[in-house]
Amino acid sequence: MDHFYKTSPVLRIRLGAFCKLQKPGGISFTSLNLEKTQEGNGVKVTISGISDTRDNLVIFKNNLQQGIGISEVNFPADSWIKPENITFYAALTINRRKMMEGKQKHT
C-alpha cells in the first residue's frame, strides 16, 4: 500500500478530496472503484452502496455535486424508486483542473 501512495500522488490527492465529503450516517459503501481518465487529468469513481433512506441518498448526491473538483455525478433512475433500504450505484469524475479552480474560489 505504501508503494501505491508513493507512486500515485495525484490519485492520493483526488481520493483525499473525495474522502472529505460528508456522508450521511445511513449511507454505507459496498464497493469503491477508481480509474484514471483517458486524458490523465482526472479519476473516474464508481460507488456501490446501501442507503437507509431516499432522503439520505439525496443528501449524499447533493454533497457529491457540491464537492470541489467533482463533476459528472450520475445515479441511475432505479436508485430513487424505493423509499428505504436502497441499493445504489453512482459514478462521478474528480478532475484536477476543477479541483484547483475550486480551491482558488475558496481561498
Image (tube, helix red, strand yellow):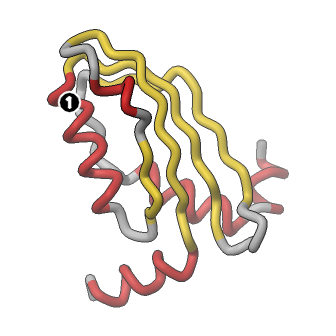
For the point 51% across and 57% down, the residue is 16
Can you tell which quarter of the image residue 49 is in?
top left
Answer left or right for 101 relative to 22. Answer: right
Residue furthest left as drawn: 55
Q: On the rendered image, what quadrant is the N terminus found in?
A: top right
Whether 17 is drawn above or below 46: the answer is: below
Can you tell which quarter of the image residue 26 is in?
top left
The residue singled out by tag 1 in the image is: 56
Answer left or right for 13 relative to 2. Answer: left
- Pick whichever, 8 or 54, lies toward us: 54
For the point 28% across and 26% down, the residue is 80
Residue 65, position as x, y percentages in the image: 32, 57
Q: Secondary structure at mark 1?
A: helix
Whether 74 is drawn above or below 31: the answer is: below
Q: Amino acid at mark 1?
A: Asn
For the point 75% across and 73% down, the residue is 39
Whether 9 is drawn above or below 28: the answer is: below
Residue 32, position as x, y percentages in the image: 59, 34
Whether 8 is drawn above or below 41: the answer is: above
Mark 1 closeness class: few <14, some 14–19, many ≥20 residues within 10 Å: some
- Pick whichever, 56 or 23, lies toward us: 56
Answer left or right for 83 relative to 77. Answer: left
For the point 55% across and 70% down, the residue is 95
Answer left or right for 28 relative to 12. Answer: left
- Pick whichever, 77 or 87, lies toward us: 77
Q: On the rendered image, what quadrant is the C terminus found in?
A: bottom left
